[in-house]
Image (spheres, grey):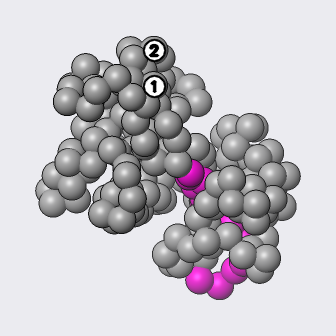
Amino acid sequence: MYLRPRALTPDHALDAFESRSVEQTRWLREHARQAHAARTAHVMAVAPQDSPDVVAYYAWNMASVAIDAVPARVARGVGRHAQPFALLARLAVDTRHESRGLGHALLADVVMRTVELSTRIGCRGLLVHAEDDAALAFYLHALPGFEASPSDPRHLVALVKDLRCTLGA
């Protein structure tokens, strides 16, 4: 049994974390605490009920996206200005905890938080930069409302209105 995602704390143990992505593993172990403390990223961690070991995490922050980097549907009716999006910067699951729904649960958590955030500040939706083809396939399967950016097919965008529909489904 896992605890709900919560903000990274000094009590979380990071050294045992090992995901399929060397970059995501390294970032959690070496940079997550500093990024979280400096508020350059908000890190949400999942641990088992009986352990402080992080077994899954995501990091997100706000981003500004150039209007020519969003799909045409997203760009309609907003002028030629850069658009504010929540950026899911990182998401990873420890290999020993794969196939238990943690990746989908983390994505659902960030979708819910993005919708909530959009009621308080300017936020058009969620942006994801998929690290590789496997991550891209995961995001497209988990959230069919994602659309590829015209500037990079691994940059995915979902509008808040689409995220609300996903939560309602």
Q: Which mark is residue 31?
A: none
In the rendered image, the vertical position of residue 83 relative to residue 103, given as above or below: above
Q: Which residue is drawn at 30% across and 63% down?
A: 119
Q: Which residue is drawn at 49% across and 75% down?
A: 4
Residue 131 position in % (x across, y down): 58, 30
In the rendered image, the vertical position of residue 102 relative to residue 13, given as above or below: above
Is residue 27 visible in the rendered image? The answer is yes
* Span of residues in magenta: 49-61
Looking at the rendered image, the quarter that the C terminus falls into is: bottom left
Task: Identify the residue position indicated by label 2 in the image.
Answer: 151
Number of residue marks: 2
**Picture quarter containing residue 120?**
bottom left
Circle 1 Cα neighbour tier, 10 Å, few/some/many (<14 / 14–19 / ≥20) = some
Identify the element where label 1 is drawn.
Answer: loop
Q: Residue at x 46, y 48 (%)?
A: 86
In primary-sequence order, the first of circles 1 and 2 is: 1
Work out whether residue 16 or residue 139 is closer to the camera in this orientation and state it: 139
Circle 2 Cα neighbour tier, 10 Å, few/some/many (<14 / 14–19 / ≥20) = few
Work out whether residue 44 or residue 87 is closer to the camera in this orientation and state it: 87
Identify the element where label 2 is drawn.
Answer: loop
Q: Does the magenta stretch include residue 139?
A: no
Residue flagged by tag 1: what amino acid is it?
A: Ala
Task: Give the number of the mark in front: 1 or 2.
Answer: 1
Is residue 112 visible in the rendered image? The answer is no
Work out whether residue 94 or residue 143 is closer to the camera in this orientation and state it: 143
Residue 111 position in % (x across, y down): 36, 55
Is 128 displayed left or right of 79 in the figure? right
Residue flagged by tag 2: what amino acid is it?
A: Ser
Discs 1, 2 touching: Cβ within 8 Å: yes
Task: Identify the residue position indicated by label 1 in the image.
Answer: 66
Residue 63 position in % (x across, y down): 52, 41
